[in-house]
Amino acid sequence: MSVRKFLLPVSSSASAEAALQTGLMLAKMWSAHLQVLHIRTDTREIAPFAGEGLSGAMIEEMMSATEREGRTRVHNLRELFVAATEAAGVPMGDAMRGRNEPSASFMTMMGREDELVAYKARLADLAIVPHPLAGEDVAAAGALHAVLFDSGRPVLLAPVESPSSIGKRIAIAWNGTANAASALASVMPFVRQAEAVRILVCDDYFKPGPSGAEVAEYISHHGISADVVKFYPINRVTGAGLLAAAASFGADLMALGAYSTASRLRQLILGGVTRYVLENAQLPVLMNR
């Protein structure tokens, strides 16, 4: 079992850099293809939302400005992509498809970002999403949720800063749920190549389901030894305790079942482990539902 294709949706150069470095690192690690995707706004969709009282000339100017901004953004992203892939020594284009070598390509599409990202992610082994705090990119959060809720595929939240390694030391956040099991299945290709694996459990985080010890027993069937460590909330914040435990282990990748303890809306309003990790993680986080 291996990973052969990654999807990386990008919206701005400010937020894309660390995610692009992460994607290229993974492409080289797996001899896989990294498809970088940018969704452009369809200017025809602006007119209905322009508001009453605007003249046709004003609406036309608004659409032209959006088109100019879109062309500039594509140009900057493509330049960033070319520079990063050349620096990483990764061939560009689709000609390498199917070969046991890394490759990368850049494509643009026009339409609704949440829909198109979800559609394209359905045919990727893993989607990589820029961290929403990188460049204060609100669109990155939308792409993250589009993959999680509408693609049926796992998503890797890239860190704000480019990582030095991925998957050497893996922390698995385990709470016994089906979402955690999905994340475990998605991270297993990385687990098989890891130097060390730790399963993190917490009484305040756990739901009815298999124990951490049972997860370690399952992983052992794949020839991997993993230890089980209990962590504790910090100032009553479970997510803070989880990230501290992962950092103490020196993890450079964490697997997490997203939005498994409450509804997405409840977590967005009241907070939760997923929300805390999304806002505070310094390492790559592989999530699934």
Image: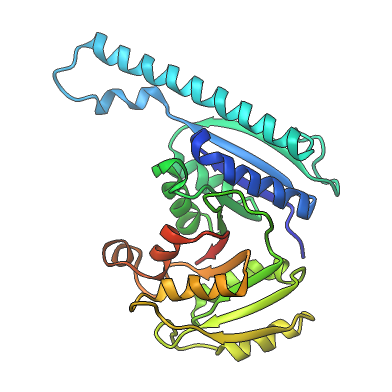
- Please report the residue visible at 39 percent of the width from the left and 85 percent of the height from the top: 204
In the figure, 59 relative to 26: above or below? above
From this viewpoint, which residue is outermost toward the front? 248
Residue sitting at the far right: 100
- Snapshot quadrant of residue 185: bottom right
Query: Is residue 21 visible to us here?
Result: yes
Instruction: State the image coordinates of residue 274 (x, y, percent, origin top left).
Output: 42, 66
Q: Quadrant of residue 267?
A: bottom left
Q: Nearer the viewer, residue 253 or 244?
A: 244
Furthest residue in direction left, as rendered: 53
Residue at 84% across, 46% down: 101
For the residue pair 38 and 83, the one nearer the viewer reads as: 83
Q: How is the image coloured?
A: rainbow
Residue 141 position, x and y percent, is: 42, 49
Whether residue 25 sits left or right of residue 71 in the image: it is right
Up the image or down, 192 lies above or below 157; here it is: below
Side (left or right) of 176 relative to 57? right
Q: Is residue 154 visible?
A: no
Q: List x then y, in percent, for residue 275.
A: 39, 63
Q: Residue at x 48, y 74 (%)?
A: 242
Quadrant of the rendering where the N terminus is positioned: bottom right
Where does the image place residue 16, in percent across and percent down from the top left? 55, 40
Left or right: 259 as drawn, with respect to 80: left
Q: Give 3 or 240, whichever is nearer the viewer.
A: 240
